[in-house]
Amino acid sequence: MIIAVDGPAASGKGTIARALADHYGLPCLDTGLLYRAVGLSVLKASGDPDREADALAACNFDKAILSDPALRTEAVGSLASRVSVHPSVRQALVQRQRDFAAQPGGAILDGRDIATVIVPDADAKIFVTASVHVRAQRRYDDGVAHGGHPDMDSLIADIQARDTRDMSRDHAPLRMADGADLLDTSNLTIDAAVQQAIALVDAQL
Ligand code: C5P
């Protein structure tokens, strides 16, 4: 059984994918981490994320970077969104994701193009979204909980810029796949969103 969970930044797709993984007893891959690792490794190599050759070279990142605390920052999310527009970078990461999906027993993957490009024949497809304001508020609360002093206006601007780049790129843009169900988490608690996701997946199986 393969479950594809796509959606924009801070929509709740990662939380939902992990809860589905628990519920169905499946391994889960956050594919955004791969693009984040490429973005962070370009930064560490003093490369230019907008230069395809620099971004492609960074696809051979050292696995240790996957546990770097900087990986989850919005700054690295934004670098990830810049390196992920390059077709050769996307191509370099495709097989790794398909291999994960193909393991016996199945898997859950979350990202932007899982149901459209990586595994279009997934058994269940969910597109998770939420309003820009709600998503920025989640990032804000997260920042405060980690002792930071986030600025709401710049969080909104960052999320909007990332949405625009992810939805308007030529290769594997963020969009809802044919056959996917939409789950808007704007007004839902985490528990309610997870329950709805389980109901949507069960109905698709
Ligand atoms: O999901 P996350 O915010 O960690 O993703 C970071 C960035 O990586 C996204 O904004 C997007 O540009 C890129 N990405 C992608 N395809 C995926 C997952 C992430 O292009 N499957």
Image (tube, rainbow, N blue to C red):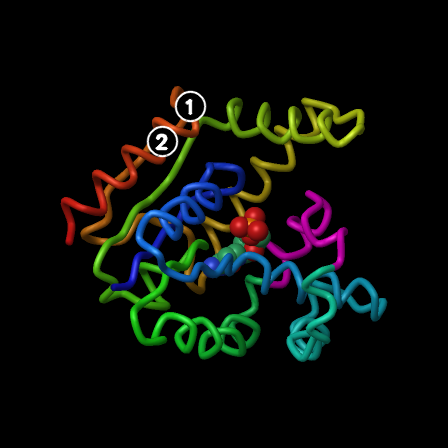
Q: Amino acid at mark 1?
A: Thr
Q: Position of residue 33 (x, y in %)?
A: 59, 59
Q: Is residue 151 left or right of residue 109?
A: right
Magenta stretch, residue numbers:
68-83
Q: Nearer the viewer, residue 22 or 106?
A: 22
Please name the residue shown 72% across and 75% down the image.
Answer: 62
Label 2 crowd (10 A; few <14 / some 14-19 / many >=20) = many
Q: Position of residue 100 (x, y in %)?
A: 42, 72
Please name the residue shown 48% across and 76% down the image.
Answer: 96
Q: Is residue 79 magenta?
A: yes
Q: Mark 2 sits on what residue?
A: 193
**Ligand 1 under 8 Å from disc 2 Cβ:** no
Marks 1 & 2, CB-CB < 8 Å contact = yes
Q: Position of residue 65 (x, y in %)?
A: 73, 66
Please name the residue shown 37% across and 40% down the image.
Answer: 128
Residue 28 picture quarter:
bottom left
Label 1 crowd (10 A; few <14 / some 14-19 / many >=20) = few
Q: Where's ligand 1: which quadrant?
A: bottom right
- Considering every residue shown, the one lying at the far top of the view is 187
Q: Is residue 8 magenta?
A: no
On screen, residue 90 above or below 110: below
On screen, residue 33 above or below 194: below
Q: Nearer the viewer, residue 77 or 72?
A: 72
On screen, residue 8 above or below 21: above
Q: Is residue 143 left or right of residue 187?
A: right
Q: Position of residue 163 (x, y in %)?
A: 51, 42
Placement of the C terminus among the 4 image quadrants:
bottom left
Please name the residue shown 57% across and 44% down the image.
Answer: 162
Q: Is residue 198 left or right of residue 35?
A: left
Q: Mark 1 sits on what residue?
A: 189
Q: Amino acid at mark 2?
A: Ala
